[in-house]
Amino acid sequence: MKKTIFVSSFSESYINRTFIMDIDAIHKALANPVRRQILHWLKSPEEYFAGQEHPLDFGVCAGMIDKRSGLSQSTISAHLATLQAAELITPRRVGQWVFFKRNETTIQAFLDSIHGDL
């Protein structure tokens, strides 16, 4: 189910924009404990990925997530794709690497939606 949410975001001034969130895709993404663990790690990357060669401002390299999880690259790639499809994480390509960060706007909108609906 897609839900339209009105989100205020701050830049130089407050700007209201429409935000469409796929609630079912988010629930599906959060149904898996590995994906929840990845989101947890990405919440505090300095704690879990301090050894990363590139600045954590870029996000966390997919390879570092592979290493931390102990799962295969293809398995983690599938989990990251599901999180990305639900817009819970955002990718950033730098050269040959892809870095991931949590999408705090989507996460907060989802939490607000759940709080309001239940």
Image (cartoon, rainbow, N blue to C red):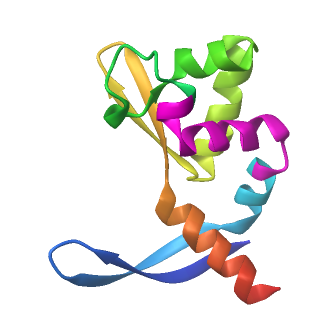
Dominant SS type (magenta): helix
Q: Residue at x 29, y 16 (%)?
A: 95
Q: Quadrant of the N terminus?
A: bottom right
Q: Magenta span has 41?
A: yes
Q: Residue at x 64, y 70 (%)?
A: 110
Q: Residue at x 64, y 12 (%)?
A: 67
* Picture quadrant where residue 77 is located: top right
* Picture quadrant where residue 22 is located: bottom right
Give the percent coordinates (x, y) of residue 10. Answer: 28, 75
- Please indicate whether residue 85 sits to the left or right of residue 16 in the image: right
Q: Magenta span has 13?
A: no
**How many marks do you count on the picture?**
0
Residue sitting nearer the eye, 35 or 51: 51
In the rendered image, the residue lying farthest to the front is 47
Give the percent coordinates (x, y) of residue 3. Answer: 64, 78
- Please indicate whether residue 38 sits to the left or right of residue 102 in the image: right
- Please indicate whether residue 78 sits to the left or right of residue 55 in the image: right
Position above or below: 65 against 87: above
Give the percent coordinates (x, y) of residue 80. Answer: 63, 33
Q: Residue at x 83, y 40 (%)?
A: 33
Q: Quadrant of the C terminus?
A: bottom right
Q: Which residues are magenta?
A: 30-47
Position above or below: 103 against 53: below
